[in-house]
Image (spheres, coloured by chain):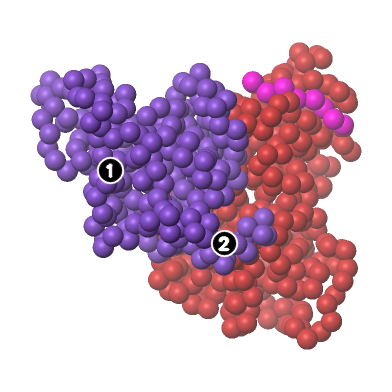
């Protein structure tokens, strides 16, 4: 597929490929989304704003230029922004493909890093020489100011111009906790939200710290997605309960929303409010307990986002979808076209019964076959 | 709801502004609210930062000069100061990021930062284009951009039944064609009308927009404009701040579901 090479989230020409529960594939303009949904549907979007998670600077022991891409943390707390997992690159910037970027110097526990106005320490090297836990000096206010003044949105070589923060915040962007934009949300302009509301379709949000989609290293990419913190507000938990009670569908806007809702439901099939850490991955063999349909970008075969689609549809349908995306010239990546995938009824047949005893298992473990 | 009259006059929508004393019988609706104030180191802005934090709100404020920001942060424990210039496009998202980083979300935005444009009042025909542009950049485009950047967070508060209000500080100059107030008055008229349109368009999202005229106050802006006015005849910014806080408290009461808000507070 052709990558969308510039921010174009309000593109009137954006397309939408629809995979019906029956397996039928349809092509629509993305603006038709409200008409393709049902008035009883509940849409759930990720309202995370995107951090400027790319921090350029220097590895002080060697003086080498580095880029640190913040990639994860175990909380959404705005006052605890000192401790992160991160991927480290050598010189160059987003114009060089990540897989071609020079490696950083050897990183060791205790190494000091200068990242613009920020200073940080390598707490430990994780299971790859470029994958570290780092601690940033200073109180939260100073760290936020450092991010705001020095950080850049993480971006890849398919986008030619440097991205600004306004390019990577969706209309619904609120808590700044995502490391990469929850890009399915770019489909939701305020006009789209008004059209959805006019059709009687409800909207709820959760906050999910979407992680990086690529590191440029196959061994590291295989570890994605990392654990991601999420928060489900009480009003959203209630909306899911109400929706299910009147047999409405839950439509997730983005793979991060699927991950959060299905993680929350992994204990007893209900979606409780609160903050947790999503640790599971979804793919073929995962049983969807809450989500009935997904609006997402178009994803490259082999990516973790693409693998997640296997929880919705079987291999033959997925193959047909990929062929149609290719032959109809859909644009891929974060500013590209969209898909709406309804899960097939047979795969979704009564995964939970309200009367069945609650399934108790460690979160995450029962979702991956 | 868009209120236009000076704050010492009953609002035009039938006097729905609450009596603060009544509101406080229950709990101050501002208690625990997440508020951002622009222009928070002087005049009405500083008075608002003090008043809101006194009433239990969690406040982040914005101002251009670091020294002023640090002075207010020293004075008021728990208040977050952000250095930035709302008239500069490049500063808006860094400001929004720090506001949301400080508060985790946002219930109330007060676009208070304001400039006369020219250093002193001029006939419109003597006003330099650059001065007019500066008035529009600070008084109209700044609030527009910052509101847009923070709208996702404000709408989330409305969805979660916490209530959500944007206050734009207006002026009677927005309605009365006072000679020599051209750049300022035109910008305030634009701000007022923009507020009405936001309010119309975002009613369904539950975000309320208020255009509030604090009246003639004893502030630096007023001294610059009319140095010969007797300050003792002008309203004190503290009084205007209390009145504005009361109107916001009333708006929050109307727009939030108290039971839900309590449940949300417990959840958090």
User: Which residue is under mark 2?
Assistant: B261
Q: Is B209 left or right of A126, judged from the image as shown?
A: left
Q: Which residue is mark 1?
A: B213
Question: Residues under labels 2 and 1: Cα distance?
Answer: 29 Å
Per the image, is B68 magenta?
A: no
Query: In this picture, is A112 found above or below A98?
Result: above
Q: Which is nearer the eye, A288 or B72? A: B72
Q: Chain of mark 2?
A: B
Query: Residue B231 has which mark?
Result: none
Q: Residue at x 79, y 68 (%)?
A: A266
Q: Is residue A80 left or right of residue B4?
A: right
Q: Main secondary structure of the magenta part?
A: strand
Which colour denotes chain A?
red
x%, y% of residue A349? 73, 82
Write down the region rendered in magenta.
A117-124
Image mark count:
2
- In front here: B266 or B101? B266
Q: Is residue B189 visible?
A: yes
- What crowding class fits label 2: few (fewer than 14 Cα within 10 Å), some (14-19), or many (20 or more)? some
Q: Nearer the viewer, residue A314 or A74?
A: A74
Residue lying farthest bottom? Answer: A355
* Chain letter, colour purple in render: B
Label 1 SS: loop
Q: Are marks 2 and 1 in contact (CB under 8 Å)?
A: no
Residue A57 at what x, y percent from top left?
68, 21
- Say which quadrant the C terminus of chain A sits in: bottom right
């Amino acid at each position: 597929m052709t990558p969308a090479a510039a921010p174009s989230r309000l593109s009137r020409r954006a397309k939408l490929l629809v995979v019906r529960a029956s397996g039928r594939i349809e092509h629509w303009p993305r603006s038709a989304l409200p008409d393709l949904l049902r008035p009883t549907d509940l849409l759930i979007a990720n309202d995370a704003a995107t951090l400027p998670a790319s921090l350029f600077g220097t590895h002080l022991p060697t003086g080498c230029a580095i880029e640190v891409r913040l990639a994860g943390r175990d909380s959404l707390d705005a006052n605890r922004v000192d401790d992160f997992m991160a991927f480290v690159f050598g010189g160059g910037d987003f114009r060089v493909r990540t897989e071609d970027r020079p490696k950083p110097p050897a990183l060791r526990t205790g190494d000091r890093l200068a990242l613009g106005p920020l200073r940080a320490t390598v707490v430990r090297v994780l299971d790859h020489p470029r994958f570290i836990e780092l601690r940033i000096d200073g109180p939260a206010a100073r760290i936020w100011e450092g991010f705001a003044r020095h950080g850049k949105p993480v971006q890849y070589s398919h986008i030619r111009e440097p991205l600004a923060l306004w390019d990577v915040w969706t209309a619904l962007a609120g808590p700044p906790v995502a490391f990469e934009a929850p890009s399915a949300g770019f489909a939701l302009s305020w006009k789209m939200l008004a059209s959805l509301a006019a059709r009687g379709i409800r909207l709820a949000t959760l906050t999910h710290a979407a992680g990086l989609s690529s590191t440029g290293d196959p061994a590291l990419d295989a570890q994605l997605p990392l654990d991601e913190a999420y928060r489900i507000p009480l009003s959203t938990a209630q909306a899911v309960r109400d929706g299910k009670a009147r047999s409405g569908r839950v439509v997730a806007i983005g793979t991060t929303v699927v991950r959060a809702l299905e993680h929350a439901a992994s204990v007893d099939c209900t979606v409780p409010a609160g903050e947790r850490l999503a640790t599971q991955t979804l793919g073929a063999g995962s049983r969807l307990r809450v989500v009935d349909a997904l609006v997402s970008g178009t994803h490259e075969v082999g990516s973790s986002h693409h693998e997640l689609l296997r929880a919705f549809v079987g291999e033959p349908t997925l193959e047909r979808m990929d062929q149609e995306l290719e032959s109809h010239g859909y644009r891929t990546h974060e500013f590209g076209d969209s898909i709406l995938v309804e899960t097939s009824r047979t795969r979704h047949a009564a995964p939970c019964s309200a009367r069945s005893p609650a399934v108790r298992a460690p979160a995450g473990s029962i979702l991956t076959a | 709801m868009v209120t236009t009259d000076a704050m010492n006059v009953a609002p035009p929508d039938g006097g729905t502004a609450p009596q603060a004393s009544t509101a406080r019988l229950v709990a101050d609706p501002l208690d625990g609210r997440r508020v951002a104030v622009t222009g928070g180191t002087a005049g009405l802005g500083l008075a608002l930062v003090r008043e809101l934090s006194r009433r239990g709100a969690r406040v982040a404020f914005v101002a251009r000069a670091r020294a002023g920001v640090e002075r207010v942060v020293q004075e008021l424990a728990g208040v977050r100061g952000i250095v930035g210039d709302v008239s500069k496009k490049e500063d808006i998202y860094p400001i929004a990021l720090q506001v949301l980083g400080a508060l985790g979300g946002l219930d109330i935005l007060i676009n208070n930062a304001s400039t006369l444009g020219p250093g002193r009042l001029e006939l419109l025909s003597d006003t330099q284009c650059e001065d007019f542009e500066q008035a529009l950049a600070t008084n109209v485009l700044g609030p527009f951009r910052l509101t847009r950047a923070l709208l996702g967070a404000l709408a989330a508060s409305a969805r979660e039944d916490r209530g959500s209000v944007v206050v734009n500080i207006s002026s009677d100059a927005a309605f009365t064609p006072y000679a020599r107030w051209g750049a300022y008055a035109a910008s305030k008229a634009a701000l007022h009308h923009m507020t009405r349109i936001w309010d119309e368009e975002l009613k369904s999202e539950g975000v309320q927009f208020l255009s509030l005229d604090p009246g003639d106050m004893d502030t630096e802006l007023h001294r610059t404009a009319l140095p010969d006015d007797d300050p003792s005849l002008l309203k004190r910014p503290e009084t205007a701040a209390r009145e504005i806080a009361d109107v916001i408290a009333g708006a929050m009461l109307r727009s939030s579901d108290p039971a839900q808000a309590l449940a949300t507070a417990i959840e958090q």
